[in-house]
Image: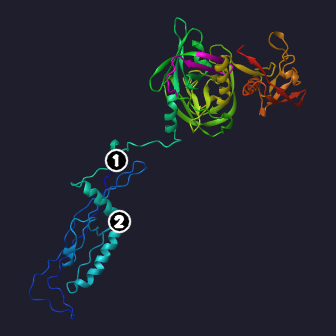
């Protein structure tokens, strides 16, 4: 597609009529001298200059190219005319405006040529201020660079400045800074078929620790192989340091970690606001180093997700984003506009109505583990290799929704649903109580309660709202702890 516009040439001034054969002589005018050359009558055409307006590729329309031919009316011959500098810059401006119809020239009066010259020159200069200030100047610029009068508005890629840089804070600048700290994870099981999958992780520290989702590496955790490939194409073998199935967080370590690893900065997910910009980096369907953008659509979204392998679900009070997240994005960072990690992309809403990592495409409902929670889990895994979970010491029903989280009548295997001398028992909770609020957040189901509990640490004191026999009450529970996945 050409970037040139073709405009219609503006017609030049019509030629001035010749002097009458026998011009009338005013009574007051002196007789003409009998000898000496008579100046030739008629206009002297001025050189043509094509005024070319380069097309603006950024606007919805391109300004037309205007070819303006200016013909200046002749002025009487005088000695002053020979004193004009030759080849000076700029040349005499055109006498007619570039836009609109030209004015017809005023034929000079043979009887009094010098009396009309000043007025005519003033008119020409006034017109030049209008036309020459823009059209004439551009026309001269184009003429100086195109001897044959043909010009083009096509811009070649070589005209782009070599020093062009993206402004800080743009998606391009944030992505360029973050990509070296994001790796594509290849996981293969230790079985004869070598099954596995692709996910994403990001550099946590310069010692070579990589944070990702548990479901990304679960297939290779027992006797399988893991590798991490970075945006520069270099690949490194890795091993599992620790996994937290309930949190869906895992930490790997590169076996031969290179120098100069670039850990991604961690943000504060508690300060994230709905509407904040987000950037997701990952390998959707194996397409490494893919960057997508969106916003925070909601906070504290209770999500229970599974990988379809029959293992236990993971629970999170998630950040919801409409940034495109697909299978393969799992474990990758969700960044804010400054490039800080605010979450770990973990689950998507599938069209089948469930949460998980199915092969369904993105429908704009993605969920990320808040980084504040993931950071606590990662630090624990690096330190001990095992996760630590906060607990209330009570078993709740996981299937009912809408009325809160009801403490079950019996626990697993017929045991008590409220652990004797546990956190819930000390807070005065009993079987049949329905927990409707936890730490200021509304609770509508068992999964929602667990999601909120796991945003805290063991030892935290949290206010609980509950209902018993149709009456609402409040109490405070001090969270206990459980080590490892059960």
User: What percent of the width, then of the height, locates residue 58?
Assistant: 42, 48
Colour setup of the view: rainbow
- Quadrant of the image for the C terminus? top right
Q: Is residue 235 magenta?
A: no
46 shown above or below 39: above
Kind of element beneath mark 1: loop
Q: Secondary structure at mark 2?
A: helix
> What residue is disc 2 on?
133
Q: CA distance from mark 2 to mark 1?
A: 25 Å
Q: Is residue 85 left or right of residue 482?
A: left
Q: Badge 2, how many Cα within 10 Å: few under 14, some, many 20+?
A: some
Provide residue 288's location: percent of width, then percent of height: 49, 25
Numbered disc in front, either 2 or 1 = 2
Residue 149: x, y in percent? 23, 55
Query: Which is nearer the eye, 459 or 97?
Result: 459
Is 232 placed above or below 171 here?
above
Residue nearest the viewer, comparing 291 with 150: 291
- Which residue is more in the foreground, 365 or 204? 204
Image-quadrant location for residue 391: top right
Q: Is 30 situated left or right of 419 in this image?
A: left
Find the magenta span and give its range: 240-261
Residue 3 image label: 1
């Amino acid at each position: 597609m050409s970037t040139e516009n073709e405009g219609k040439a503006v017609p030049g001034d019509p030629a001035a009529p010749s002097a009458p054969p026998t011009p009338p002589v005013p009574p007051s005018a002196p007789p003409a001298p009998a000898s000496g050359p008579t100046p030739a009558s008629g206009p002297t055409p001025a050189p043509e200059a094509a005024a070319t307006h380069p097309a603006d590729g950024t606007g919805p329309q391109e300004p037309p190219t205007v070819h303006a031919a200016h013909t200046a009316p002749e002025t009487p011959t005088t000695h002053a005319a020979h004193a004009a500098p030759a080849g000076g810059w700029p040349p005499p401006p055109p006498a007619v405006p570039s836009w609109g119809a030209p004015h017809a020239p005023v034929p000079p009066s043979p009887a009094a040529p010098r009396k009309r010259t000043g007025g005519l020159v003033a008119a020409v200069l006034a017109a030049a201020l209008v036309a020459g200030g823009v059209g004439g100047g551009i026309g001269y610029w184009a003429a100086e660079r195109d001897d044959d009068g043909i010009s083009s508005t096509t811009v070649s890629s070589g005209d782009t400045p070599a020093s062009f840089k993206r402004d800080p804070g743009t998606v391009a600048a944030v992505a360029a800074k973050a990509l070296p700290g994001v790796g594509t994870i290849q996981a293969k099981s230790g079985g004869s078929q070598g099954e596995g999958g692709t996910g994403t992780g990001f550099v946590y520290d310069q010692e070579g620790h990589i944070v990702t989702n548990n479901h990304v590496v679960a297939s290779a955790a027992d006797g399988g192989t893991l590798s991490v490939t970075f945006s520069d194409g270099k690949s490194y073998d890795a091993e599992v340091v620790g996994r937290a199935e309930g949190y869906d967080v895992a930490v790997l370590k590169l076996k031969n970690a290179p120098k100069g690893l670039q850990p991604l900065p961690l943000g504060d997910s508690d300060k994230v606001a709905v509407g904040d910009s987000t950037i997701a980096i990952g390998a959707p369907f194996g397409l490494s180093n893919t960057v997508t953008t969106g916003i925070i659509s909601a906070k504290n979204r209770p999500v229970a997700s599974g990988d379809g392998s029959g293992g236990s679900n993971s629970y999170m009070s998630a950040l919801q984003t409409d940034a495109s997240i697909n299978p393969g994005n799992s474990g990758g960072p969700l960044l804010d506009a400054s490039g800080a990690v605010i979450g770990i992309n973990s689950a998507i809403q599938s069209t089948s109505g469930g949460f998980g990592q199915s092969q369904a495409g993105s429908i704009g409902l993605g969920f990320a583990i808040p980084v504040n929670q993931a950071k606590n889990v990662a630090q624990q895994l690096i330190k001990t290799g095992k996760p630590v979970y906060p607990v209330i010491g009570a078993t709740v029903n996981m299937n009912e929704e809408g009325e809160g989280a009801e403490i079950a009548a019996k626990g697993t295997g017929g045991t008590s649903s409220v652990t004797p001398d546990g956190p819930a028992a000390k807070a005065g909770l009993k079987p049949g109580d329905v927990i409707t609020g936890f730490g200021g957040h509304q609770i509508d189901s068992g999964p929602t309660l667990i999601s909120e509990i796991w945003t805290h640490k063991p030892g935290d004191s949290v206010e609980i709202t509950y209902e018993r026999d149709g009456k609402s009450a409040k109490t405070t529970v001090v969270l206990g702890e459980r080590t490892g996945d059960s």
